[in-house]
Image (cartoon, helix red, strand yellow):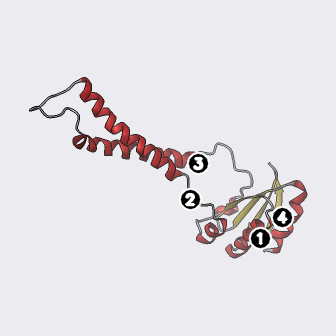
Amino acid sequence: MQGIIGAFPEIDCAVHAIEALKKERLGDLTVYTPTPRHEIEEVIDRGPSRVRLFTLIFGLLGASFGYWIPIWISDYWPIIVGGKAVITWVPFTILCFEVMVLIGGLATVFAMFGLAHIPRLTMTVGYDPRFSSGHFGIWVVTDPERTDDVINLMKKYGASEVRRER
């Protein structure tokens, strides 16, 4: 994977460079920041996270499993008390809720780690240690014939260093 990495000392320069790179459609962007910044999030505009979809699906699966368990147990080992129905939904709702929260919560955690690719066993290409101490970084994966355009654009918007990496 070949690309261009640019280091920006100021957030405004990085934001303007991201806007220009997206406008020119020069390649896929990865942005590194020392702290989460709303300016970067607004200009990247990734859309809603897919983690909530995992939470919904597995929460509903957990709720249905939470109802199925006591119904299955009551069907195999019925306890008839005073002529009442063996299978009723009211007492089973507590277990349904608990299993829904358990399965939905676990799915949320695993989806968050899975979609964020945590843990990363290899060093990320295009990362510089300065991006953890104050600089903002933009990694652009682009075609070889468009690398000069990316380099010129990053320098135009105030990058302190621009280099090619593999």
Binning the other alpha carbons within 10 Å of mark 4 as few (below 14), some (14 to 19) or many (20 upward) gives: many
Foreground disc of the pair 4, 2: 2
Q: Quadrant of residue 129?
A: bottom right
* Amino acid bearing label 3: Leu
The one nearer the camera, 11 or 146, is 146
Binning the other alpha carbons within 10 Å of mark 3 as few (below 14), some (14 to 19) or many (20 upward) gives: few
C-alpha span from label 1 to label 3: 27 Å
The residue singled out by tag 2 in the image is: 48
Question: In x, y percent, where is residue 29?
Answer: 73, 59
The residue singled out by tag 1 in the image is: 20
C-alpha span from label 4 to label 2: 28 Å
Foreground disc of the pair 3, 2: 2
Foreground disc of the pair 1, 4: 1
Q: Is residue 72 left or right of residue 60?
A: left
C-alpha span from label 3 to label 2: 13 Å
Instruction: Please tell me which of labels 1 and 3 falls first in the chain.
Output: 1
* Amino acid bearing label 1: Ala
Question: In x, y percent, where is residue 140?
Answer: 77, 59
Query: From what the image shows, is residue 107 above or below residue 76?
Result: below
C-alpha span from label 2 to label 1: 23 Å
C-alpha span from label 1 to label 4: 10 Å
Q: Residue at x 47, y 45 (%)?
A: 57
Identify the secondary structure beneath mark 3: helix
